[in-house]
Image: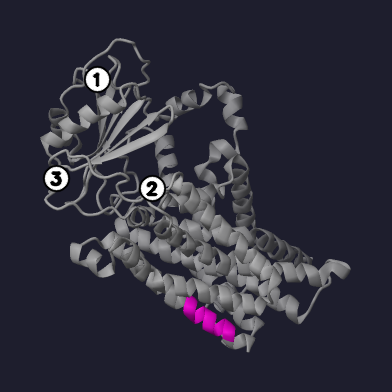
Amino acid sequence: MKAGFRQRMAALHTWCGLTCGWLLCAIFLTGTLSVFREPITRWMQAKPQLAGAPGLEQPALDSAVRHLQAQAPGAAFWRLEMPTRPGDALELFWRTPAGPRQAAMHPATGALLPQPWGRPTEGGRHFMSFHYTLHGGTAGFWLVGWVAMCALVALVSGVVVHKRIFQDFFTFRPGKGQRSWLDAHNATAVLTLPFLFMIVYTGLAFFYSSYMPWPLRAAYGADDGAYGRYQAELGAPAGQRRQRSGQPAPLPALAPLLQQARALNGTPAGMLFVERPGDASQVLRVFARVPDTAATRTILNPRASVAFDAGGAVLERRGPEPVVGHAALDAQHVVESLHVAAFGGWTIKWLYFGSGLAGTAMVATGLLLFSVKRRQRSLHEFGAATPRVYRVAEALNVAALAGAALASIGYFYANRLLPADLAGRADWEIRAFLGVWAASLLHALLWPPARAWTVQLGTAALLCLALPLLNGATTGQGLWGYLADGDWQRAGVEAVALGLGLVLAWAALRARGRRR
């Protein structure tokens, strides 16, 4: 009976892992890249460094207000992104009926800078959005949830099936075909097992009210205000929900408010958000600057902010410390911070990045193990159609692994090759990513699998290694210039691309050697 149970769990592990593994590889890879979404966005925007711009000055604030009042008097909001490093611009954002608009100013003089300032792009947010929606809207969101649930089942069944899993972790036999793939699968699984359980579970728990809405509806109703009532009882700050009064009111002087917010928040301002500008009900919220580590050292680290009314009086202050006495809210924030690595600084981000790559390798070796085993001994699960099913499975393996890597680096190339003033530029970058990924599947279906592996891995490697050359040719920027300016984020993007290019080149050479 015990043997029968293990066989059933093995079948569950195999087919659950296989059917969700193709998408799971891309989801894991893009989630891993999204850990560094801020540096990726900064690299893709390619904003020039301004000479003689040490920080924000009063003339720039005055010019920003005049520009917004002239260009967006009836906008629902204004957003001012403060310069965080020497050489950064003061950036303005607002929304009109025709869509979002933006402008950039010199932070010392307030002079308008050429448009577009940098390259309009979705940047690293593309990887984050694909990670949980596949850019498929609600259907993609639910599909990712289903894949995550299947991944959790595959993890549990994998632990049950491999009774010597921890012993096998210390065993690796290279050059043994199927045995080597199983050793690699076991090693990467044991190495990342706690991380994988945590990341998959928190990914599902992150959207608990969306994936399981029925308890919330039963307790709080199904109307538009249900979620607000739930959040209020959970302990989340309600904020200032004011309606436009229709009475005009001037904007208070910004410099004193920024100084007061700096004293209250303990750090300089990173962003100023003006709700209903020009109306007596307007609220000016000053958010504290996020440090370069993109997170504090604690796992509960809400961003500090101060809200002012139209007269400049303090309406609300949210400190960087957690809300006292709200254990449920703290638990929710812990789950979110654990999943997105919003704590621990760059050290945790690098640990997540390495663990994510190892987790991707674990899924990849599992997919390859299936193909190697069936290549050696077919089980004829699909009758006469079994060879064709196996052939499609091998093509999906190529697209899920090599194709996802090729599409990811292709996204960076689209960013540099598309014209900077192209309308809908960010959408075209995403289309390029999806188009390359679809082309990789078509290529894998039409070409022999062994050759498809070599071509796609080799192409991805070449593109990764040539990325700094492309950047220099299209923007005049490059790795050495970033290092000279102390811009470690953009330098890190190119350094990681070079490192991953070497890994992919090694994999392409191994695939070519095996094909021969």
Mark 1 vs mark 2: in front? 2
- Secondary structure at badge 3 equals loop
Q: Which mark is residue 309?
A: 1
Compare marks 1 and 2 and give the one earlier in the sequence.
1
Q: Residues within 10 Å of mark 1 (few under 14, many from 20)?
A: many
Please indicate whether residue 369 sits to the left or right of residue 351 in the image. right
**Residue 216 picture location, percent across and down:** 57, 29
Compare marks 2 and 3 and give the one earlier in the sequence.
3
Residues in magenta, as a range: 504-512
**Residue 307 picture location, percent across and down:** 26, 26
Q: Which mark is residue 55?
A: 3
Mark 1: amino acid: Asp
Q: Closer to the camera, 321 or 339? A: 339
- Secondary structure at badge 1 equals loop
Mark 2 vs mark 3: in front? 2
Location of residue 84 with respect to 194 vertically, above or below: above
Q: Closer to the camera, 461 or 219? A: 461
In the image, residue 48 lies in the stretch drawn in magenta: no
Report if the CB atoms under discs 2 and 3 are less than 8 Å apart: no
Q: Which mark is residue 421?
A: 2
- Secondary structure at badge 2 equals loop
